[in-house]
Image: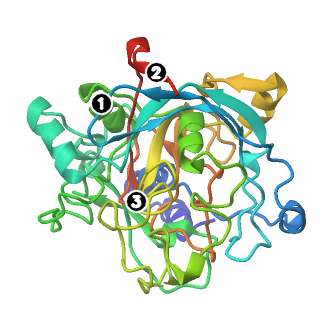
Amino acid sequence: MRLNQVLVVLLCFTGVACHDANQQENSKDVFQAKVDGAVSCTSIGLYPADSILYMQGGGSEYKSSVINNIKSAANIEGMVWIPGGEFSMGGVNPTGMQDGGKEAMDDARPVHRVFVNGYYMDEHEVTNAEYAAFVKATGYITVAEQKLSKKEFPGVPEADLVAGSVVFTPVATKDLSDHLQWWSFVHGADWKHPLGPTSNIVGKDNFPVVHVAWEDAAAYAKWAGKRLPTEAEWEFAARGGKAGNLYTWGNQFKPDGKWMANIFEGTFPANDEGRDGYIGIAPIKKFPPNDYGLYDMAGNVWEWCYDWYRPDYYEELSKEGVAKNPKGPESSFDPMAPTEKKRIQRGGSFLCTDQYCTRYMVGTRGKGEIRSASNHVGFRCVKDIGKKDIARN
C-alpha cells in the first residue's frame, strides 16, 4: 500500500476529512495514470538465455533483407526515399549483453518476416519550428495544453483538472523499480514549455518537438500531407537495409569510440554526464545518419507510430509467413495497464541507459497512452508515393 493510500485509510477511519482525502487520492491516481501512460520504459524481469545465444551465434533468427529494386522520380525536401522490401522484424533479448540493459523485451519477439512498400520518411524528427508553423496555420491546441476533463477523470476535484504533461526530473535513488520517483505530471508543461511553465523553447527551433500526444502528432502529419509511419515501416527504415543488427548503425555500440546516439551516460536517474555531447535533448542531426540517411533513429526522443500496441502481436504476425504492409492490431492491450489505449513508440530517447532501458536498440518496442505526452516523446512522418513517381532501377 502506498503512503498516500495509508493516509486516506487513517483519515477515513478517524472520521476526519474522509471526502477530501478520497478526492486527493483520486487526483494522485490521475497524475500517476498520466505518468504511467506517457512512460515507455519500466523495469521487468531478466531472461538472458536467448541473448547468450545471440552473442555466440550472431542473430541466426534473422534472414537477409530483400530490398525493392525501385527508386522515386520525386524529390521531396527534408524527406528520404525508403525503397521498401522484405526483412526480418523484431529484436533479441538484450539482457546479458554488454550495454544490453535490464529488460528482456519479450514483446519484440518472435523475429518474423515482413514486406513493406516504398515510401518517403522525414530525415529527422519534427522540430519545434516545424510544429510552430503548423500551430500558427491552424490554431491547433495540443492535448497537454487542454484541461483534464471530468469525463476522462471522474471524481477528481475541479482544482486538479489542470493542463499539463509528464516531465523527467533527475533524482538520486538506487531503487529503479518505481519510475514515479523521476517522472511527474507538471501543470503548465507543454510543447512550448517543455520543463514546466517557467521554461521555453527560445533558441531551440531545431530541437525535436516534445509533449505531443499521439493525436497531436497525427494532426500535424495530416496537415503536412503526410502520415505517421507504421511500426513495420519505422523498423525497416531504421535498419537501413541491413539484417539483424543490434543498432541502427551496426553491432558495435561505439564504433571507433564514437558516440552514435543521444542517450543517458552517468548514474541513472540522478546524473546524465553528457559524454555523448548532450545532457537532455539534442538538436536534430548531431549524430551520424544511418545507411538510408535518417538521423536520430536511436535515442534523442521517442517517435510515435501508427499502430496500436499489443505484446502478443508479433506472435500473430509470425503465423502469416510474410506479413505484407502490416498496420498493427485492431485494438490495444497492455497487461501492465489494461484499461489504457496505447500506440507504438519507437527509437528510445535521451534517457535510455544500460542501467535501466536500452530501447534505442533497433527492433525493440515502446508504447504510450494515446492522450499522454512527455518531454522525451516526439515523432517523424512518412509520405506515400504515387505510381507515376516510381521508376525501376
Q: Quadrant of residue 13?
A: bottom right
Residue bearing mark 3: 376
What residue appears at the point 26 percent right and 39 percent down from the top-left corner?
A: 77
Residue bearing mark 2: 391
N-terminal-most mark, 1 or 2? 1
Q: Is 31 displayed left or right of 68 in the figure? A: left
Instruction: Tell me the mark number nearer the camera, choosing from 1 and 2.
Output: 2
Q: Secondary structure at mark 3?
A: loop
Q: Secondary structure at mark 2?
A: strand
In space, the residues marked 3 and 1 are separated at their CA atoms by 19 Å
Q: Is residue 20 above or below residue 75?
A: below
Q: Is residue 189 above or below residue 233?
A: below
State the image coordinates of residue 168 (x, y, percent, origin top left). 40, 68
What residue appears at the point 40 percent right and 64 percent down from the top-left corner?
A: 184
What's under tag 1, amino acid-wise? Ala
Q: Is 149 displayed left or right of 108 in the figure? A: left
**Mark carried by residue 219:** 1
Instruction: Tell me the mark number nearer the camera, choosing from 3 and 2.
Output: 2
Instruction: Bin the neighbour count of mark 1 within 10 Å (Cα to Cα): few under 14, some 14-19, many 20 and up.
Output: some
